[in-house]
Amino acid sequence: MAIPNTRGSWTLDGAINQRWDDAGLDTTIKLEWPAADRLIDKYQALNDGFARPTPPGPYVVYEKSIPVVMAHMSGHTAAQREDQLQQILVAFRIHAKSTAAESAKSICIRLAKEVAEAFDPNTAPWEMTDDKIVIVKRGPDFHAREDDDEWVWVLQYDVLIDAEYLQA
């Protein structure tokens, strides 16, 4: 009997981080920060779930929904295994504050375009090492004012994953 490889939605985290790195978005975001803060390791341009401590300039937080199992599949390869089709909603939240030269909303729009281009399912595949992304669909985006000079822009993606669930 083969020992199963443990699977979880962390394979999607790996794909998101790889796509982010490949697109050079850390540099894009950090160029918006004051020069003195760009090399400080405690601040991240991309944050999983929440940003603590809050970065000095614009930053992005991504969140994943609880996976919804759409189907189970077995026997489709020579190996005895079961796969799950999992649907996961991924939301990227671009946060920005107004500067002397530009409004927070304008910064959010500009950076949202960069993130959307990097994660465009038609031009930039999200590569996974263990599981397989079946399809990525971009959902609607929206924005909200967080404070007088703070805005957030939200990009949504519906991701369908073929995840290995059980190996016999």
Image (cartoon, helix red, strand yellow):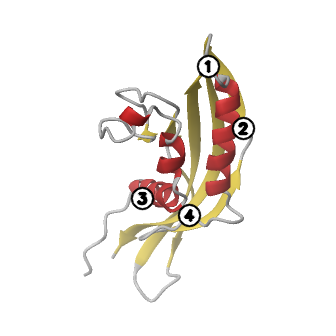
Q: Earlier in the sequence, mark 3 or mark 4?
A: 3
Q: Residues within 10 Å of mark 2 (few under 14, many from 20)?
A: some
**In this rendering, is residue 94 above or below 161?**
above
The quadrant where residue 86 appears:
bottom right
Residue with the mark numbered 1: 100
**In this rendering, is residue 168 above or below 24?**
below
Mark sitting on residue 126: 4
Left or right of 73 in this view: 4: left
The mark lying in front, picked from 4 and 1, is: 1
Q: Earlier in the sequence, mark 1 or mark 3?
A: 3
Q: Earlier in the sequence, mark 4 or mark 2?
A: 4
Give the structural element (helix, strand or loop) at label 4.
loop
Q: Amino acid at mark 1?
A: Ala
**In this rendering, is residue 100 above or below 1?**
above
The quadrant where residue 151 appears:
top right
Residue with the mark numbered 3: 14
Q: Amino acid at mark 4?
A: Trp
Q: Residues within 10 Å of mark 1 (few under 14, many from 20)?
A: few
Q: Earlier in the sequence, mark 3 or mark 2?
A: 3
Give how far apart the Cα atoms at labels 4 and 2 are: 19 Å
Give how far apart the Cα atoms at labels 4 and 1 are: 36 Å
Q: Amino acid at mark 3?
A: Gly
Proximity of marks 3 and 4: CB atoms separated by less than 8 Å: no
**In this rendering, is residue 56 above or below 11?**
above
Q: What x and y, as percent, mark residue 108?
A: 65, 32
